[in-house]
Amino acid sequence: MTIENLIKYIESEYGIKYDTPFKESDILIFRHKENRKWFTLLMRISADKLGKNGKEILDILDVKTDPLIREPMLKKKGVYVAYHMNKVHWLTIVLNEVSDDDLKFLLDLSFNLTKAKRKK
């Protein structure tokens, strides 16, 4: 999925537009309106930051995950231990290396894990 298509998907699926809270940065943050918690970050990093060879620039997405899902997902191509986030609860996805179905599944999971809790 391209960055443009991903942004359109998130905006239409969740009704959320990105913000850029970091000055002089192209990191796009998508967060819940109610609690302001991030559910995904979109950024560009060099491949070596994920342990890959080379300095190719990759479009990545960080998503929150359930620790039970983490290990099976890490066996898939394009899914890595989180870059610059909690290594147990977040994953990094290389956009052009994962299927759209896996990407949408992980986005939904992240969205649901970070939404506001209902009060009893």
Image: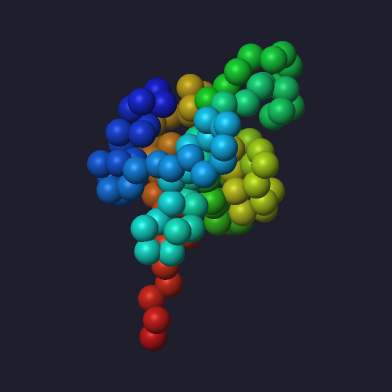
Q: Do we see residue 94 in this rendering?
A: no
* Quarter of the image where one finds residue 50: top right
In the rendered image, the quadrant that contains the C terminus is bottom left
What x and y, as percent, mark residue 83? 66, 38
Q: Residue at x 39, y 49 (%)?
A: 108
Q: Do we see residue 15 in this rendering?
A: yes
Is 24 above or below relative to 20? above
* Residue found farthest to the bottom: 120
Is 89 above or below relative to 41? below
Is 110 above or below relative to 60? below
* Residue found farthest to the front: 23
What x and y, as percent, mark residue 45? 62, 26
Q: Nearer the viewer, residue 34 or 13?
A: 34
Q: Nearer the viewer, residue 9 or 96?
A: 9
Q: Nearer the viewer, residue 9 or 102?
A: 9
What x and y, as percent, mark residue 82? 64, 42
In the rendered image, the quadrant that contains the N terminus is top left
Q: Residue at x 36, y 58 (%)?
A: 33
Q: Residue at x 67, y 42 (%)?
A: 84
Left or right for 80, reference 109 = right
Q: Nearer the viewer, residue 45 or 18?
A: 18
What x and y, as percent, mark residue 75? 61, 36
**How many numbered marks does the figure carry?**
0
Is 15 above or below relative to 120? above
* Quarter of the image where one finds residue 119: bottom left
* Image color mode: rainbow
